[in-house]
Image (spheres, rainbow, N blue to C red):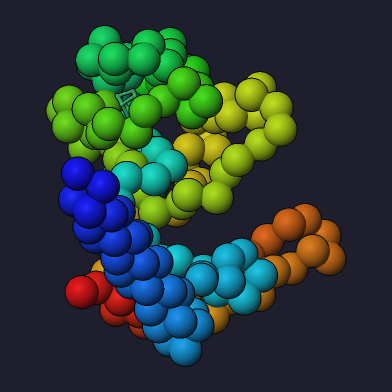
Amino acid sequence: MSRALDKAGTWIGWAFFADLASGLALTIGYMFSRPVTMQYPDREKWLPYSRYRGHHFLKRDEAGEIKCVACELCARICPCDCIEVVPYEDENGQRHPAKFEIDTARCLFCGLCEDACPADAIALGQQYEFSSFSSRDLVIGRDDLLAKPGKAMTGGGVVAARLNTAEALQVEASALRGYDWWRNIRRR
Ligand code: SF4
Ligand code: SF4
């Protein structure tokens, strides 16, 4: 009986040693491989994919007029109830938004407002740097939405960037395409 226990103990010991050796091999392997850490935001910046759903923006038509006809469909379909539209009619009977606000602190960036819009007036763009210490700053009005950047045209990647702290905290990147960060991730 005691010999059988001794044998089992030896096997368990070898099993733990094999685990330890495999863990150490992995650690040593990573010590000599290329680092995968992205130096965000002061040296590198991620460019979103074209299908990325970032901050909303409102569109204008060819004449420069806001496309939104204040039908409120986006507000109705929004699962977070974070869009508020107040319509008005101009002298020609055309509807426009007197007030168009999105509370991005509550938004889950599902894109349903973009899908529901019959006028192709609202979409989710490429901006993802809009965090704030105050939730009040995350309520964005019509004019700010008209000034927001549109859809990303490039296909993702990481580009060299510079953190500008001279006036406000801004990440500046000039390249349109970057390297594929995912290729640095080691996979077995
Ligand atoms: S993305 Fe979704 S949650 Fe956000 S405003 Fe549009 S419908 Fe609402
Ligand atoms: S953005 Fe589109 S869905 Fe929303 S109120 Fe304007 S026209 Fe209607």
Numbered disc total: 0
Q: Residue furthest bottom?
A: 32
Answer yes or no: is residue 115 visible.
yes
Residue 88 location, quadrant: top left
Q: Nearer the viewer, residue 158 or 72?
A: 158
Q: Is residue 85 left or right of residue 155?
A: right
**In the rendered image, the vertical position of residue 117 relative to residue 95, given as above or below:** below
Residue at x 37%, y 28% (from the top left corner): 108
Q: Nearer the viewer, residue 73 or 36?
A: 36
Q: Quadrant of the N terminus?
A: top left
Q: Nearer the viewer, residue 36 or 180?
A: 36
Residue 135 location, quadrant: top right
Determine the quadrant in which ligand 1 lies: top left
In x, y percent, where is residue 162?
A: 66, 75
**In the rendered image, the vertical position of residue 78 relative to residue 53, given as above or below:** above
Residue at x 50%, y 83% (from the top left corner): 31
Residue at x 40%, y 83% (from the top left corner): 29
Answer yes or no: is residue 181 visible.
no
In x, y percent, where is residue 121?
A: 28, 36
Q: Is residue 45 left or right of residue 24?
A: right
Residue at x 20%, y 74% (from the top left corner): 188
**In the rendered image, the vertical position of residue 73 relative to residue 68, given as above or below:** above
Residue 100 location, quadrant: top left
**In the rendered image, the vertical position of residue 11 relative to residue 18, given as above or below:** above
Q: Nearer the viewer, residue 95 or 110?
A: 110
In x, y percent, where is residue 33?
A: 43, 86
In x, y percent, where is residue 156?
A: 32, 68
Q: Residue furthest right?
A: 166
